[in-house]
Amino acid sequence: MKIFNKNSFIIFWRTIRYNLKIIFAGKFVWFLIASFAFYIFFSIMSIYQGDVLGEGMVYNLMLFPGILLIFYPSVFGIQNDEDSRILEILFGIPNYRYKVWLVRLMMIFIQVFLILIVYGFVSSYLLYTVQPLEMAYQLMYPIGFMGGMAFMFSTLIKNGNGTAVIMILIGVTLLILGGNFERSQWNIFLNPMELPNNFNAVIWESIVLKNRIFLGVGMVVFLLYGLYNLQNRERFV
């Protein structure tokens, strides 16, 4: 029984390593370095400009680096499968592609969540004391929403560079329009850690709750639609 458990763990670990290698294609480390570099840069600029230290500021500082972490695996995942010559193998096994990509998406989100927790501890040490778990949890809503959207578009466009262009355009548009929805439940980049001035706390909590429901449902819909698109084998092979 012990041998079985040991063998099962070894197989499980090797499967995780193999899928992570395909997902990130050896390039994720550069996105991780870029993410941390942006985090440090934004932190220094915020301190230099005299921004008020608080949980709201830390949330904003970690948001873009977090999106950058999920950008590469969700945008280039399908293309990495094709480049690795395993896309046709996945489509040759009925329903196997759903299980593979569902597990991969779970690994991507878990990994990003863990990295955000590390960022939270770094922020508590260098900037302002926050609760890393709570901060990472709140950040996963907009990050998961954008990651799910990127995965959905990757199954429609089937090209990493094309998907990247679309997501960048969407991101810029959302940032430009963000001012019009700053206190709205439809604001994808709503900061739940920062209560607006002269705003009722109870109303704000209601807006934040509705916003998190909107982002959570949107993320699930994007992911399910992306997995559904994988049914159309002719579009990929």
Image (cartoon, helix red, strand yellow):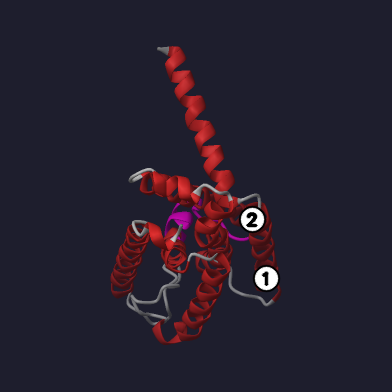
Query: Which mark is drawn over residue 28?
Result: none
Q: Which residue is mark 1?
A: 47
Please tell me which residue is depicted at 41% across the width and 64% down the height of the picture. 152
From the viewer's side, name the closer residue of 137 and 108.
108
Query: What span is in magenta?
Result: 126-139
At label 2, the amino acid type is Leu
Q: Is residue 41 above or below residue 30?
A: below
Q: Secondary structure at mark 2?
A: helix
Q: Main secondary structure of the magenta part?
A: helix
**Residue 56 seen from this side:** yes
Q: Is residue 35 above or below residue 13?
A: below
The verdict on residue 164 being magenta is no
Horizontal arrangement in the rendering, residue 117 relative to residue 100 (left or right):
right
At label 1, the amino acid type is Ile
Quadrant of the snapshot with the N terminus: top left
- Indicate the position of residue 101 as horizontal and vertical percent values: 42, 49
**Residue 121 seen from this side:** no
- The crowding category of the residue bearing disc 2, from other C-alpha atoms within 10 Å (few below 14, some 14 to 19, many at least 20), is some
Q: For the residues carrying marks 1 and 2, which lies nearer the camera in this image? A: 2
Please tell me which residue is depicted at 47% across the width and 80% down the height of the picture. 174
Residue 177 position by quadrant: bottom left
Q: Earlier in the sequence, mark 1 or mark 2?
A: 2
Disc 1, disc 2: CB below 8 Å? no
Q: Secondary structure at mark 1?
A: helix
Please tell me which residue is depicted at 36% across the width and 61% down the height of the picture. 229
Q: Is residue 96 above or below residue 145?
A: above
Q: Which residue is mark 2?
A: 32
- Indicate the position of residue 140 as horizontal and vertical percent values: 44, 59
Horizontal arrangement in the rendering, residue 42 relative to residue 180 (left or right):
right
The verdict on residue 134 being magenta is yes
From the viewer's side, name the closer residue of 196 and 226.
226
Q: CA distance from mark 1 to mark 2?
A: 23 Å
